[in-house]
Image (cartoon, helix red, strand yellow):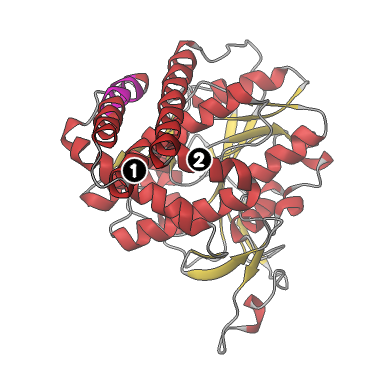
Amino acid sequence: MIDFVFLSLVLFAVVYWLAALASVVLDQRRRPSTSDVAPPVTILKPLRGNDGQLYENLRSFCLQDYRSFEVVFGVRDLHDPAVSVVEFLRHEFPALELKLVADRRTIGTNLKVSNLANLVRHAKHDTLVVADSDMRVGPGYVRAVVGPLEDHRVGLVTCLYRDVASHGLASRLGAMFINEWFRPAALVDTHVERLRHAFGATIACRRDTLDSIGGFEAVADYLADDYMLGRLVSGRGLDVVLVPYVVENVVTERSLQRLFLHELRWARTFRTLRPMTYFCSLFTYGIPLSILWLAACGGSRPAWVAIGLHVGLRALGRVVLYRSLGQPPPWSDTWLVPIRDAVSFVVVILSFLGRQVRWNDERFRVRRDGRLERRVKIGDRPDLAGPVAAPAPASEWEESA
């Protein structure tokens, strides 16, 4: 009976991986839509701190091959390390409209969403693009993500991203998770059901669409604000489109502990939003399942065969996955594959054993509906005790440098 159960599970994992690789190949054949319509665009960039990659990340948005766009950067105060990077870019690109907004107004527990709500008030154009500060793009990015919005049945455009390891074991493991698990899983999902959510790598929409769902205020207390924006737009009867444009993120985690806490926050987000789907994802990890089979049966031959099969499948899969990203597979990291899969397997299990997460060195509890509750300790400042803090005056530089 044990052999039968584990055999069924590892075969399911094989089928999943074949479907995942097929989804990646099909996505590789798609091309970004091209359109002669190029509406003026406002790019909203919420910022917090400088991870050492911020200058190159932000600079890539200043190099767009696009006729008319502005970039509005936002921080909560002028002491943020990101301010000096923005000021440098304003001197480097004097012909561009680069605005810096400093505003402590808080509308909810998710401070990034508060930042976005403050920024959109200074957006000059009605076509909006939101991209996280750790994303890096090519010169054709804006054209690729705003093209589908020409169709008014499309309410929101999003895209996936790939990770690049900067240095150290933690960044390599982090990049492997995104490139080898998250991206193919997201593509499988688009073939199983209609896309109804967005990814934080990019969100593009029209201002009237954002207003129709209640603006950023509607997601101000959610941990997965990107996911919820897509759900709300889809709920209006509009399409959410995933374009075949992949942006880049440089993984800067320097410690395994910070990587673990980061991935546990993601996992508890997914568990909250889609509990059954995320639970079933446990059965896509063929290597850990095969190891459990081996342990349960005292070293049976079929379990050893299953381990060899899944290691080989993962190695073959890495060739397909990285070639789809336009790069050779990092063979030097192949020995990390069983470790990466085992860690991911454990993180999924742990995601169901609690609701606390750490984000930007603060502790939160994720409620059943996906909203955040800040965990208040004795000595915390009063204005951080609740989901909404009193607004503070804004400082703004409207002129382009």
- Horizontal side of 85 relative to 372 (left or right) equals left
* Mark 2 Cα shell of 10 Å, populated few (<14), some (14-19), many (≥20): some
Q: Which mark is residue 216?
A: none
- Residue 152, percent from left and from top: 78, 20
Q: Is residue 129 left or right of residue 30?
A: right
Q: Residue 69: horizontal and vertical position, in percent?
A: 59, 31
What residue sits 57% from the left and 52% below the top? Answer: 269
Magenta-colored span:
315-323
Q: Position of residue 400 (x, y in %)?
A: 55, 43
In the image, residue 180 lies at what x, y percent?
37, 33
Please name whichever residue, 194 or 71, is drawn nearer the observer in this view of the structure: 194
Left or right position of 29 against 151: left
Quadrant including the N terminus: top left
Q: Which residue is mark 2?
A: 281
Seen from the viewer's position, the closer of residues 79 and 267 is 267
Report the amino acid beneath label 1: Trp
- Regarding residue 67, the answer to whether it shows in the image is no
Q: Residue furthest front?
A: 1
**Left or right of residue 75: residue 238:** right
Residue depicted at x 32% and y 53%: 52
Viewer-side label of 1, 2: 1
Front position in the image: 240 or 306: 306
- Secondary element under disc 1, as helix, strand or loop, is helix
Numbered mark located on residue 293 in the image? 1
Q: Residue reaching furthest left?
A: 332
Above/below status of 368 relative to 362: above
Main SS of residues in magenta:
helix
> In the rendered structure, are the residues bearing label 1 and label 2 in contact, judged by CB atoms less than 8 Å apart?
no
Query: Image height check: is 158 above or below 352?
Result: above
